Image: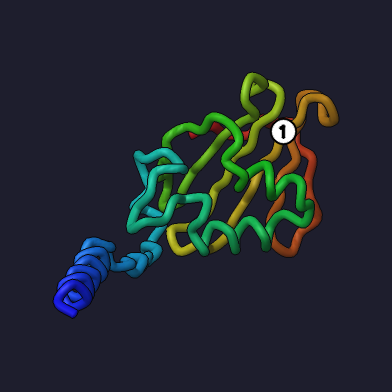
Amino acid sequence: MRFHLIFGIATALSVVAAHAATPAKKKPLAVKAPASLAVYAGKYPFDKVGGVDFYAHPLVKAGVAKAVPDPKVRQFILGRTGPASPIALTAGRILASGCEQHNCGDHGWSMLIGEKGDNPEICHHDAATMGEKSTWYRPGAAPQLRADPCPQA
């Protein structure tokens, strides 16, 4: 009987010790997107502010969705697949730009967007289909092919 008592206590202690050693599951930290896109100025689009990178910011995603009807172009811009320049603040608007890995001169994009996500203008350049021209997208307007290149941040 004494063996069973000691064995039972030892088993109970090992269960308690194992439970105590198991780390408690941490709740994910609340992520809050900054209210203004201006906080990204000087940062790369993949740098996080408040736990949110520029590409994932709801104002940026909504602006691109409003302006660009082509899902392939939206994915190219928001997909984080190639190099990007630091974001610039110019005349009260955010300028972000990027390009295709190993093909920057021929396939790139840029975005001008207000600090609150308003008035987005998206430029997409693909030399294979556009030559020297670029396509500009704005909400409520048809895409416009222009002779000027996409601006770079």
Of residue 145 and residue 66, the one placed in the foreground of this image is 66
Circle 1 residue: 125
Q: Is residue 42 above or below residue 26?
A: above
Of residue 139 and residue 34, the one placed in the foreground of this image is 34
Please tell me how crowded label 1 is: few (under 14), some (14-19), or many (20+) other residues with Cα within 10 Å. many
Q: Judge from the rendering whether residue 86 lies leftward or rightward of residue 117; answer left or right.
A: left
Of residue 38 and residue 79, the one placed in the foreground of this image is 79
Picture coordinates of residue 141, whole percent (x, y): 76, 59
Which quadrant of the figure has residue 77?
A: top right
Residue at x 45%, y 64% (from the top left corner):
116
> Could you tell me which quadrant the N terminus lies in?
bottom left
Residue at x 51%, y 33% (from the top left corner):
84
The amino acid type of the residue labelled 1 equals His
Residue at x 74%, y 64% (from the top left corner):
140
Q: In this orientation, does residue 19 appear?
A: yes
Element class at badge 1:
strand
Q: Residue furthest right?
A: 129
Of residue 93 and residue 84, the one placed in the foreground of this image is 84
Q: Is residue 12 above or below residue 152?
A: below
Which quadrant of the figure has residue 146?
A: top right
- Colouring style: rainbow
Q: How many marks?
A: 1
Picture coordinates of residue 7, whole percent (x, y): 21, 70
Q: In this orientation, does residue 35 appear?
A: no
Picture coordinates of residue 9, whole percent (x, y): 17, 74
Q: Judge from the rendering whether residue 26 lies leftward or rightward of residue 120; answer left or right.
A: left
Residue at x 57%, y 40% (from the top left corner):
80
